[in-house]
Amino acid sequence: MKHIRKYLLPIIMLVVFETVAVVLWLTKDNLFYLFNFSYIGISISIGIFLYIRKYRHARRVVQLLVGLYMLIYLGLICRENMQIEGFWYYLFTGVFEAATIHYAVAKIFGPLIFGRGWCGYACWTAMVLDFLPYKVPSQPRKKLGWIRYVTFVLSLVFVSAMFLLKVGNIERIMFWAFIIGNVLYYGIGIALAFIFKDNRAFCKYICPVTVFLKPMSYFSLFRVKCDKEKCISCGKCKRVCPMDVDMTDNSRNRKNGTECILCMECVKNCPKGAL
């Protein structure tokens, strides 16, 4: 029984995603959703299982399994714009498909359960950025978070303008917007990582998706918490956190609390197992 309890989290995640998969398959009468969410759920569950087994690259396995699937299969092969522009596009056309379902599950309501877990385990932009050499920020966090709101508005204006101007071949434009957008994201993300010596600079200052993720993440069910009795205030968890979160504060108002991507670096590096 104790052995089963140890693997309860990956089982719960698998059940959650499988439930979503079956519900969408039956309500939308489309077998794709059964495959899509089952695959993502299995990938995440495998990653959590590997983490419990203390495999050091567990999170990277999930990033590659989910990130490459969404970038190459859904984006390039199925020609679905899974960026925020795709969400606006399907929203304006009144179609609850592809990007709208993806955003609803992973980035709007999902964070109520797993917070910014998307950023840590499934984002295909961060998947590449996390391979860069600046895994731990070497400089204090900059006050540039306002830029994400600018990019958020620009993405909305871009798609809105096409509908208002009645531009033709919007689906083709959205596909190319996905390709060009990803090239820009990677280019800007890599440049910022080297400028600020911080792999996650793009996530902190530019990424428009965080505008959806942050509010819901405040209420996240799964959170890293600190056992105050074990904590010796060594500060190591703060130093290794890629998102500058103060993990020693258990309140929901902790510094950069909605930025936590559940990467578990703080947990792995805590010398007293207080997290």
Image (spheres, helix red, strand yellow):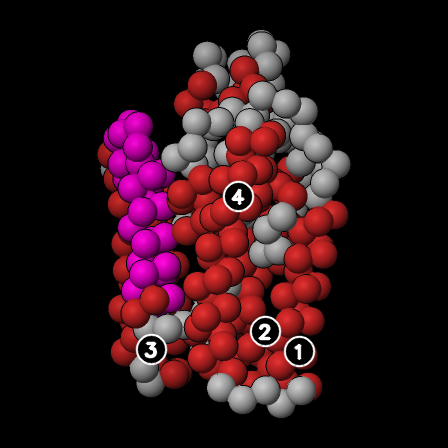
Residue tagged by mark 4?
A: 189
Amino acid on which disc 1 is placed: Ser
User: Which callout, 4 or 3, points at the residue further toward the start of the chain?
Assistant: 3
| Residue located at (28% from left, 60% from top) | 39
Do the residues bearing badges 4 and 1 touch, measured as CB atoms within 8 Å? no
Instruction: Give yes or no for contact between labels 2 and 1 (Cβ–Cβ under 8 Å).
Output: yes
198 relative to 73, above or below: above
Q: Which residue is mark 1?
A: 160
Q: Amino acid at mark 3?
A: Trp
Query: What are the residue bounds of the magenta stretch?
Result: 47-75
Q: Quote the CA–CA distance across marks 4 and 3.
A: 36 Å
- Would residue 60 be counted in the magenta stretch? yes
Please, what is the three-letter code of the amino acid marked with disc 4? Answer: Gly
Q: Are marks 2 and 4 in contact (CB under 8 Å)?
A: no
Frontmost of labels 3 and 2 is 2
Above or below for 166 versus 251: below
Residue at the disc numbered 2 = 88
| In the rendered image, the vertical position of residue 63 relative to residue 68, given as above or below | above
Q: Residues within 10 Å of mark 2 (few under 14, many from 20)?
A: some
Position of 5 compared to 92: left or right?
left
Q: Nearer the viewer, mark 2 or mark 4?
A: 4
Report the predominant secondary structure element of the magenta stretch.
helix
Please state which of residues 60 and 231 is positioned toward the viewer in this rendering.
Answer: 60
Residue 33 appears at what percent x and percent y? 33, 73
Q: Would residue 232 be seen by someone viewing this image from the given angle? A: yes
Distance between the Cα atoms at labels 2 and 4? 23 Å
Callout 4–callout 3 Cβ contact below 8 Å? no
Apparent side of residue 144 relative to residue 136 in the rendered image (left or right):
right
User: Circle 3 sits on which residue?
Assistant: 25
State yes or no: residue 122 in magenta. no
